Amino acid sequence: MTVSRPTLRMKLRRAWASLPLFLVRAFAPAMRNLQYAKRRMQPFAVVACVGFPLYYYVWKDLFPQPYENLTLRLIGAVLFLPVIVYDHWPLAAKKLLAWYWYGITLYALPFFFTFMLLKNSGNEVWVESALIAAFVMVLLHDWLMLVLQFVVGIGLAVLAYCLTTDPIVIGANYLTHLAIFSFAVAIGAVANYDQERIQIEQERAMLATAGSVAHELRTPLVAIRVGAAGVMRYLPALLQTYVLAQRHRLPVPRIRGAHLHSLQGVVGRIEQEALYSNAIIDMLLATARFAGGNMQNATSCSITQCVETALARFPFREGDRQRVHCNLRPDFSFRGSEILTVHVLFNLLKNAFRHMGNIETAYISIRLETGSRINRLIFSDTGTGISPEILPHIFTRFYTSATTTDDVSLGAGIGLAFCHDVMQAIGGAITCSSVKGEYTEFVLTFPAP
């Protein structure tokens, strides 16, 4: 059966339209893997910037090899220089970090080492060097990116060799080396795939556990609130009856004045704690369920409205609301999700109050800054701060510290990772600076609409 031309054209259009979504899903593991590789990028870049020119001297003068190329090595060193100063990149450029990183590692590992192996006629030094490069690729990349870089990098290296070499000599020994390298990469891909599966199952187990815990906790919380409502209805009358009985010297057990005073507010505190627990459950579920990626159904949101909603819904304990100081002018808009942004603020508020503890003079400050290209929300607290050794890892999912004094050690290591994922999904960023014992400051950067 033949397909009519309009139908075929329509299918091609649909396939083309769905291509970006397919690429996003295909490379999602690579993007997620990059989150865990970021802390290794700058040290790796420093090694590359030093190693590329250094080994030109090693293989040119100390242990001469048949072929060396200073230009290729300098290109490699220059490509890694921007990674060293990544913290100073503009916001728009930081969005391209993943593609830039995979591009320069494609050049530095499979392409460069394969090209040099071919140029040096497959001698022992470059066979060993190429094996080390394959090992580094296994450590750096997920299985999909590992296979792609291996195939594309070797293909480009062979092409470059053929274009720059006369006569072209690719003997049977190269095929032997290729078989060894392919086996090493295949084993690495399988190992990385299993690691990725373990991580996905860990996230699924966490979500299932969170749902189960939420269900088990909400049922007694509802009973507590219903009971508190009943007590709230009749307790004032009972307390008044006790006071009257005492006045008329009736034989009733004596209740101390302090205890009697505390009973008058206990029901309100019970209900407040139940509301707080329910809000924390909702926040944890939203945190666990958000998988990152691109923001679906993004709408225009007012940052002032998001902050006001978060402050109105957050279950402050007694006296805590007065410790939050806000300057929400000038307002700005962004493309994203109001509910997810509210939960980001919930996480920051929860962590801030945990850091502030019983420090009576500590407070939270929320203020806005606007610009022509980016806008910022600056959230700071004057609590206990975060230790310098903990600070670089606070946005890493499932990271927890070994101590019990830092906020990341008291949770599952998902709250700030959730904040990072949400801000990244709307095209923004979140950064943190802190001085132990003085303050913690989060800067949420939003792209101008």
Image (cartoon, rainbow, N blue to C red):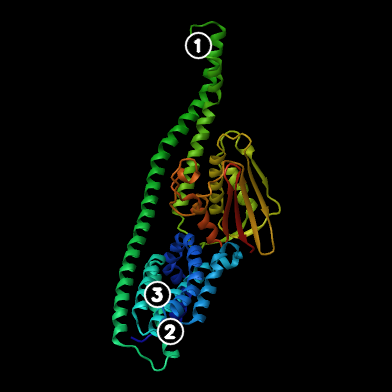
Q: Nearer the viewer, residue 331 or 155?
A: 155
> Residue 336 location in percent, x, y?
57, 59
Amino acid type at mark 2: Tyr
- Disc number at residue 148? 3
**Front tag of 2 and 3:** 2
Question: Callout 2: few (<14), some (14-19), or many (20+) C-alpha neighbours within 10 Å?
Answer: few
Where's residue 319, x and y in %? 61, 34
Tell me if 385 is positioned left or right of 226 in this view: right
- Is disc 3 surrounded by few (<14), some (14 to 19) or many (20+) residues within 10 Å? few
Distance, label 1 to label 2, CA atoms, is 98 Å
- Front position in the image: 281 or 423: 423
Q: Give the residue displayed 42% in from the left and 80% down from the top.
A: 64
> In terms of image quadrants, where is residue 147?
bottom left
10 Å neighbourhood of mark 1: few (<14), some, or many (≥20)?
few
Q: Is residue 4 left or right of residue 294?
A: left
Is tag 1's residue or tag 2's residue first in the polypeptide sequence?
2
Q: Is residue 19 above or below residue 249?
A: below
- Give the position of the N terminus as an image quadrant: bottom left
Disc 2/disc 3 C-alpha distance (Å): 27 Å
- Residue that numbered label 2 is attached to: 67
Residue type for callout 3: Leu
The residue positioned 42% from the left and 91% from the top of the image is 165
Residue at (56, 13) in percent of width and height = 243
Report which residue position mark 1 lands on. 254
